[in-house]
Image: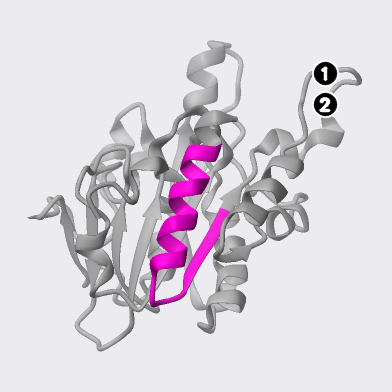
């Protein structure tokens, strides 16, 4: 719990010192959402208690991702062979974020669903090494103009158009189709005038960003790869969202750097 409390303390300090709204969303793992499907007696500590502890420890506006996902558990909200949520899972999270953050989310009929892979074998498959596992498919939620955004990764123009690096579909980590994978600072800008969102995140947010980009100009910071003080980015933001999955916050103190040198 020491790493968790260091991270929560940093998030709390950032929220208390911020003059703009700070939102906090923790994403439970599939083992939590589908705990009723596990064999009786299988070790699986409840994540709900830790999520409640985290939300009560941080002076931010909390977004209940647990409920957002649990009510759609009969849908394909997580990949079977990877630890990430699917685009469908990210979409349901986007809808709940809109309710709390004040933007009007688009309905599913406002997107064109495009399946770009039927051969995705992710991190869980790599760890298990079972040859008979059926691959996942990756479906993108496209919309008109989603290839016209200006994308920068760590200050440089992205080597692909729009949100998707389709060359990554030929590699092992096909989840990197979203923005070409992780980087320290990802900037997404539209030609339209819109609010600015500072998103402090891990890789789960990569599938969520195309939805948020319909409402915001986004600067996304992954503190695992960015050592810049967060204060360098907060002054131009209208809202701050901190979003990560449970593994990120429990297995490292990555968020303890949020207030360093600020």
Depth order, front residue of 124/21: 21
Assign a secondary structure to mark 2: loop
Residue 138 shows in this picture? no
Q: Disc 2 designates what residue? A: 38
Q: Position of residue 139 (x, y in %)?
A: 48, 52
Q: Position of residue 46 (x, y in %)?
A: 77, 35
Q: Marks 2 and 1, Cα distance to the nearest angstrom?
A: 7 Å
- The residue depicted at 22 percent of the width and 49 percent of the height is 261
State whether the magenta stretch is mostly helix, strand or loop: helix
Assign a secondary structure to mark 1: loop
Residue stretch rendered in magenta on the structure: 5-25
Q: Quadrant of residue 208?
A: bottom left
**Tags 2 and 1 in contact by the CB under 8 Å rule?**
yes
- The residue depicted at 62 percent of the width and 69 percent of the height is 96
Q: Is the residue 244 above or below the residue 209 in the image? A: above
- The residue depicted at 21 percent of the width and 42 percent of the height is 227
Q: Is the residue 23 above or below the residue 90 in the image? A: below
Q: Quadrant of residue 184?
A: top left
Query: In screen coordinates, is 218 left or right of 113?
Result: left
Q: Which numbered marker is on residue 42?
A: 1
């Amino acid at each position: 719990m020491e790493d968790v409390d260091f991270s929560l303390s940093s998030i709390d300090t950032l929220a208390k010192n911020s003059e703009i709204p700070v939102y906090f969303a923790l994403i439970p793992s599939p083992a939590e959402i589908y705990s009723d499907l596990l064999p009786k007696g299988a070790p699986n500590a409840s994540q709900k208690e830790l999520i409640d502890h985290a939300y009560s420890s941080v002076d931010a506006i909390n977004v209940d991702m647990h409920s957002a996902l649990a009510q759609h558990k009969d849908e394909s909200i997580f990949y079977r062979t990877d630890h990430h949520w699917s685009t469908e899972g990210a979409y349901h999270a986007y809808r709940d974020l809109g309710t709390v953050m004040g933007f009007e989310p688009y309905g599913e009929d406002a997107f064109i669903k495009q399946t770009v892979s039927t051969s995705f074998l992710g991190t869980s498959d790599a760890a298990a090494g079972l040859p008979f596992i059926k691959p996942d498919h990756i479906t993108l939620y496209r919309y008109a103009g989603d290839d016209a955004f200006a994308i920068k990764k760590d200050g440089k123009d992205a080597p692909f158009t729009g949100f998707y690096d389709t060359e990554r579909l030929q590699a092992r980590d096909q989840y990197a189709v979203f923005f070409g994978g992780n980087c320290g600072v990802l900037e997404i800008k539209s030609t339209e005038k819109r609010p600015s969102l500072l998103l402090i995140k891990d890789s789960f947010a990569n599938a969520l960003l195309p939805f948020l980009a319909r409402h915001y100009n986004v600067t996304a910071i992954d503190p695992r790869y960015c050592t810049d003080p967060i204060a360098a980015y907060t002054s131009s933001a209208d809202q701050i969202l901190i979003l990560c999955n449970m593994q990120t916050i429990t297995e490292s103190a990555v968020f303890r750097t949020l207030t360093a040198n600020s």
